Image: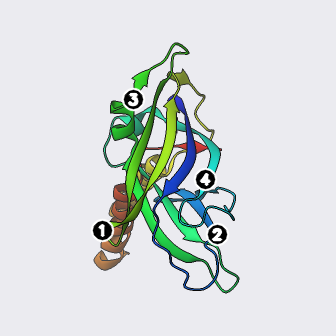
Amino acid sequence: MECRKFQIAILSAQGLQNVREIFRMKVYAQLSIPGNPQIKRETPVDTEGETNPAWNSTIRFTIGNQAVEYQGVVFVIKLYCSRTLGDRYIGEVSLSFKDLFDGAAPTSQGRSSGIVSYPVKRGGADSQGVLNFSYSFGDIVMVKKPSLFSTRNLAAAGFFIMKVVLEATLEQASISTFHSLEKMFRYVNEHDKYIELKS
């Protein structure tokens, strides 16, 4: 399958909302891919900058090339204040891989890269401050598909097999059971992402 190396360096943030009234803000960033709970990476905690933290922390992934072709594949960077009694949410930046790829500039190393700043949001509205990061996409490389089927293939194959079996034995199975299984496989298929990632 066609893949690309993706690298993001979470650099810094400025003017964040102070979510602590007494003690110092100690801020870290967490990158995640919605729909892929196993993909979650964090920067070190900045203990000095408070509302203007700096990390210069680099994270690397391998992504399927389809991730830069469809708007629906996104990643989220959430900012938290580290606390002993539970970390406090500050805000987040959510972007699609396609938007970043389309806005990237080519480099002499054959990569597409950029340095950007985005407003930090909270609850769908602009919060306070901006997040700065750089990123790059590598050239397309061919990666051998894993031996196991993807979730999408399993859902499609599973639905076909179950449908044939159930139709063949419809007289012995209830209609409601068939529709329940059909609904389950359709849900899995519709919620699968156009992305395959590896650390």
Given contact means CB atoms under 8 Å apart, are the residues at marks 1 and 3 in contact? no
Identify which amino acid the numbered label 1 is placed on. Gly
Q: Residues within 10 Å of mark 4 (few under 14, many from 20)?
A: many
Q: Earlier in the sequence, mark 1 or mark 3?
A: 3
Vertical relation: 198 (above or below) 163: above
Which mark lies nearer to you, 3 or 2? 2
For the point 66% across and 61% down, the residue is: 46
Name the residue beneath numbered marker 2.
Answer: 26
Q: Nearer the viewer, residue 166 or 125?
A: 125
27 and 188: which is toward the camera = 27
Q: Is residue 97 left or right of residue 23?
A: left
Amino acid type assigned to the residue bearing label 3 in the image: Ala
Q: Earlier in the sequence, mark 1 or mark 2?
A: 2
- Numbered disc total: 4
C-alpha distance separating marks 1 and 4 = 24 Å
Determine contact: label 4, label 3, CB under 8 Å. no
What residue type is disc 4 on?
Ala
> Residue under circle 1?
124
Tag 4 residue? 54
Q: CA distance from mark 4 to mark 3?
A: 23 Å
Q: Are marks 2 and 4 in contact (CB under 8 Å)?
A: no
Indicate the position of residue 38 as horizontal and vertical percent values.
61, 58
The residue pinned by badge 3 equals 104
Q: Is residue 192 left or right of residue 143?
A: left
| Label 1 secondary element | loop
Where is residue 63 drawn, in percent x and y?
Answer: 52, 38
Identify which residue, 158 or 81, lies in the foreground.
81
- Numbered circle sitting on residue 102: none
Q: Secondary structure at mark 3?
A: loop
Label 2 sits on a secondary structure element that is loop
Helix, strand or loop at label 4? It is: strand
Amino acid type, callout 2: Lys
